[in-house]
Every structure is written in C-alpha cells, then in structure tokens.
Amino acid sequence: MDKNANDMNVFGHLEEMRSRLIRTLIAFVVSMAAAFLYVGDIYDWLVRGMDQKLAVLGPSDVLWVYFMIAGVVAIAVTLPIAAYQVWRFVQPAVPDQARKSTLMFIPAISILFLVGISFGYFILFPMVLHFMQNMAADDFTIMYTAQKYFTFMIHMTLPFGLLFEMPAVVMFLTKLGILNPMKLAKVRKLAYFVLVIIAVTVTPPDFLSDIMVIVPLFLLYEISISISRLVYRKQLAAAEDSDGENLKPSA
C-alpha cells in the first residue's frame, strides 16, 4: 500500500514537472514569434555602430541570424516565466515563512540577467571587438558576415547574463537548505579559479581586459556569499523563535 502511494506520488511529481516544462516551452515559442515580428528593428539597433553592412554567404544566413536574435530575446522574456514555474514546482518543499521571500527571486533573476547582458554588450563585446580589429587591421581586409558577427556577439553577452544570475540562484538554494554560506566560503578558491578561467577565456590577452571581467565576477561571488549569510541567519533566528514557542508551557 505504501509502495503504491509512493509510486503515485512520484508519477504525480513527474506529471507536474512535464506540465510546467510544456508551459515554459509555450512561453518561449510565443515570445520568439513576437520577437520575430520586430526582429528587423532589433537588428538595425544592434548594428547601428557598424561602418559597413554585414555580409551573408547564402540565402539561409539571413533567416538564421534573425532566428538567433529572436531566440535571445525570447530567452530574456521566458526566463522569469521559467523561474516562476520552478518556484511553483518546489513550493510545497519551501517553509511557509520563506515562500514570500523566495518568490522575490523571480524579478531578481530578470533584473540580473539584463544587467549581465548589458555588461557583456556595452563593455565586454566592444572591448574585444576593438582589440580584434586592431590586431587584424595591418594584415587583413576586415569583412564581417552576419552569422559570424552575431555568433560572436552572443558568445560575449549571453553567458554573462547567466553568470549574473548567481546571487539570485544562491539565495533561492539557501532558502531551500541546499546551500549555506559555510559551503560557499569553503569552495571560494575553487570558484575563483573557475571564474578566472572563464574571464581569461573570453577576453583579449591583456591584463587590463582580464581585470575588467574578473573583478565583477569575484564581486558577484562575494555578494552571493553575503546574501546566503543573511538568509541563513534569518533562518536560524526563525528556527530559534519557533523552538522557543514550542518550549513555552501551555496555559
């Protein structure tokens, strides 16, 4: 009897997960279709600083670039919807007093993603592009294809949109009891090493560019630890208050 009940419970969770994944996928498809209606205007804004038109090597390249741009816009729009679906899925496991605060991570995720994308697009991307242009100017004729240009742009921006989610994700996992500030502090050296590898990989080979990316990533990690510490202390205080209430003699 208990085994059947557990099986039903597992199947119920899997069905709910499937339902929420489908909702997220529908939101992505609808967002991408809406973005595709304005993709021409978005494209014009993204190439506004170019001195020359981007080249295409085949008729399908234009469609591929437009789908790429619309896809990134759809990710930005779908992200808070996906976060809400995750929150609703794990909500039964979240203590009642923590549900309101964990719900706040949804707008935080959207804001941090946009900040990360902006950091990549307005700071990192032009810096790396300028470095590459200077390196090629004396020996090569510079001509960009639309596919290569936007692939390069997305590689310089989208990963940082995801990396900047670190504080919100850490807050959420701390609320669930999966992470705590002690664990984060314990793996600090390893985390720094990974962040340095990421920064050195995506930036030009000069010290100043590396520092411009490494410092924000280190700050994000330290901010994540501080947020985790704050959440953890509140959880401990709430637990102590709850124990105190339970120990009070009944009237």
Image (cartoon, rainbow, N blue to C red):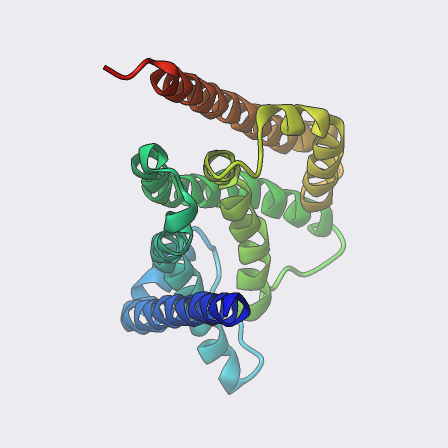
Question: Which quadrant holds residue 154?
Answer: bottom right
Q: Residue at x 55, y 42 (%)?
A: 163
Q: Residue at x 62, y 44 (%)?
A: 128
Residue 83: x %, y % from top left: 39, 52
Q: Nearer the viewer, residue 150 or 167?
A: 167
Which quarter of the image is occupied by the C terminus?
Answer: top left
Residue 156: x %, y % from top left: 58, 50
Residue 124: x %, y % from top left: 56, 40
Question: Which quadrant holds residue 40?
Answer: bottom left
Residue 198: x %, y % from top left: 69, 42
Question: Which quadrant holds residue 218?
Answer: top right
Number of marks in picture: 0
Q: Nearer the viewer, residue 242 or 3?
A: 3
Q: Please, is residue 226 above or below residue 82 in the view?
A: above
Q: Please, is residue 34 above or below residue 201 in the view?
A: below
Q: Residue at x 39, y 55 (%)?
A: 76
Q: Nearer the viewer, residue 32 or 12?
A: 12
Q: Residue at x 73, y 38 (%)?
A: 194
Q: Outermost residue, front direction?
A: 251
